[in-house]
Image (cartoon, grey):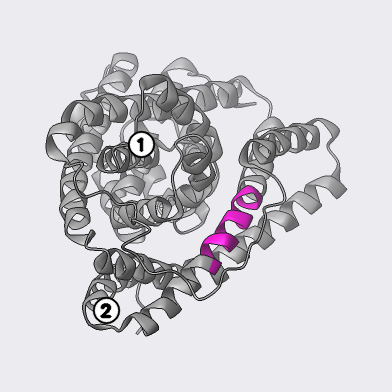
Amino acid sequence: MKTNLLTRILIAIILGIGAGIILPHTIARVFVTFNSFFSEFLGFAIPLIILGFVTPSIADIGSRAGKVLFATVCIAYSMTLFAGFCSYFVSDTFFPSLISTQAGTRIAEDASLAPYFTITIPPLMNVMTALILAFTLGIGCAKLSSDYLRNAITDFHGIINMVITKIIIPLLPIYIFGIFLNMTISGQVGGIITTFAKIIAVIFALHIGILIFQYCIASFFSGKNPFKSLATMMPAYFTALGTQSSAATIPVTLRQTIKTGVNEDIAGFVIPLCATIHMSGSTLKIVACALALMLTNNIAYNFSIFAGFICMLGITIVAAPGVPGGAIMASLGLLSSILGFSDADNALMISLYIAMDSFGTACNVTGDGAIAQIINRIFKKNNMLH
């Protein structure tokens, strides 16, 4: 029977902890060696993932002129930024008292196992170079209207999508297994499990608060009761919980948005677009998990570092919802380059993110309805869509 990614990762965590207790070190080092190779491959792939995700998205947005498009993109990005900054301030307020810094997630070199051998795979470019190149190619593609360049970008996106879905995602549970095996051997896994539970509880409450805020803002424009609108959107919310996909939930989100009183043409334009560019729930999770792991590792941070990280994150994870775990994969480069995360930290981020993936997706798609209400109020006439 085929299991979903969350189930496979949960099984990998449990087995990794058990294996860390009973496996002899000679066998455990085989998995540590695999993890060494996989982390090198992941580091090589991260700039390519950014290039493959961001370039076609920028090209597509840039080629679709119109005031409604511009307004939708600005509002979606603003809501994504708000969710990220809200997550930072809430996490910075509550996490220090909830999370112990005594059991860090970074595996101490003297307590962990070493791989039998290592293979170095240098990335073709660093993260910032990949991001700037993605913007340059995307804008250039939109302005030149070149079918050759667009087809090449589309094909490259397909290749990167295949690398993620056929290589990285299937091997990810083995990688997570190796991380938890090594942490169990080094005696750090107990603190990690406790940290996981606390983080998930806070993030769940936070994403409910974000949705309420978004619909209160929408009600300021539409004049509708925010709680009635939010209740109307609940079928989309629960559909997203089950599908874990913004794209797969579009038909339900569209239907429920129209039921809130949004014009069909407006809803038909805004909802599919926001399924790609509105990432409040994903940004909220990544920021909170990153700050929690930094606290656990006793890594210094400040608002300015996270401000830059959040602004870049809102752009980098655009178009990631089409791939399972795409948002966290696209953010790994920023986590390493801006926040200084290690391979073990990134593996834990992946585990935490996917454990809450359905809730983040539900937050994203439900918030799309609030954006549609705002756009509907600003652009009442159908011809404003063109």
Q: Is residue 276 visible?
A: no
Q: Residues within 10 Å of mark 2 (few under 14, many from 20)?
A: many
Instruction: Inspect the magenta stretch and tell me whether residue 199 lies in it.
Output: no
Q: Quadrant of the N terminus?
A: bottom left
- Quarter of the image holding residue 82? top left
Q: Position of residue 197 (x, y in %)?
A: 16, 51
Which numbered tag is attached to residue 19? Answer: 2
Is 74 left, or right, of 92 in this rendering? Answer: right
Foreground mark, 1 or 2, reads: 2
Quadrant hosting residue 13: bottom left
Label 2 sits on a secondary structure element that is helix
In the image: residue 59, left or right of residue 338? right
Disc 2 residue type (three-letter): Ala
Q: Which residues are magenta?
A: 37-49
Residue positioned 72% across, 33% down in the render: 63
- Look at 55% across and 25% down and name the residue there: 382
